[in-house]
Amino acid sequence: MNHIAQRPIESLIARYAESHLDPANEIIHFICIPAIMLSLLGLIWEIHPLAAVVLTLASLIYYFTLSIPFGVGMTVVSGAMLAVLYALPQAMVLPLSIAIFVIAWVGQFIGHKIEGKKPSFFEDLRFLLIGPLFVLGFLYRRLNIAY
């Protein structure tokens, strides 16, 4: 049998995709994953903006080890999210982040109820970091960008 070895990122995306096959669940995830990412950064921003930057840099190191194109894309996405948090009035960051976080997670669990499968991160916490790549990968495929 002739097997073509998958890179770790390809394997992770394929495993993540197994529990995200229903079109409704995919749409929910395409909306909720970036919202959760923004809200999580906002919650950490509320502790201290530098903490949000450090967390972002740590995640970017991981993303670059998986794939340079994904690392570049997540740098752009993360930078835009940090810019939004910087531009928001400080008094709005915490309440907005909490509201988005709760609503987006409810959406995620509704999506998984529709799918009939539990969220991937229940099996492997790395999938909390792979979710954003799943969304970005969809965009990359549409734009014919290899990752």
Image: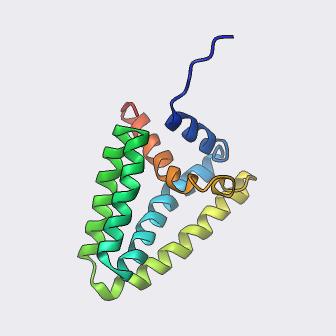
Nearer to us in this view, 64 or 70: 64
Which residue sits at x=44%, y=40%? 66
Check the image and name the residue furthest to the top. Answer: 1
Tell me which residue sits at (30%, 76%) in the image: 49
Give the image's coloring scheme. Answer: rainbow
- Is 9 placed above or below 79 here? above
Q: Quarter holding the C terminus?
A: top left
- 17 sits left or right of 143 in the view: right
Q: Which quarter of the picture shows residue 52? A: bottom left
Residue occupying image coordinates x 72% and y 56%? 118
Give whichever of 101, 11 is nearer the camera: 11
Residue 122 in the image: above or below residue 88 = above
Q: Position of residue 7 (x, y in %)?
A: 51, 30
Decide if residue 61 is on the left or right side of residue 125: left
**In the rendered view of the protein, which quadrant contains the N terminus?**
top right
Q: Position of residue 137 (x, y in %)?
A: 45, 41
Q: Horizontally, is 40 left or right of 127 in the view?
A: left
Q: Is residue 23 left or right of residue 71?
A: right
Q: Is residue 110 above or below residue 86?
A: above
Quadrant position of residue 105:
bottom right
Residue 143 point in image, percent of width and height: 36, 35
Residue reaching furthest to the right: 116
Which of the 4 quarters of the picture holds residue 83? Answer: bottom left
Q: Nearer the viewer, residue 5 or 101?
A: 5
Q: How many marks?
A: 0
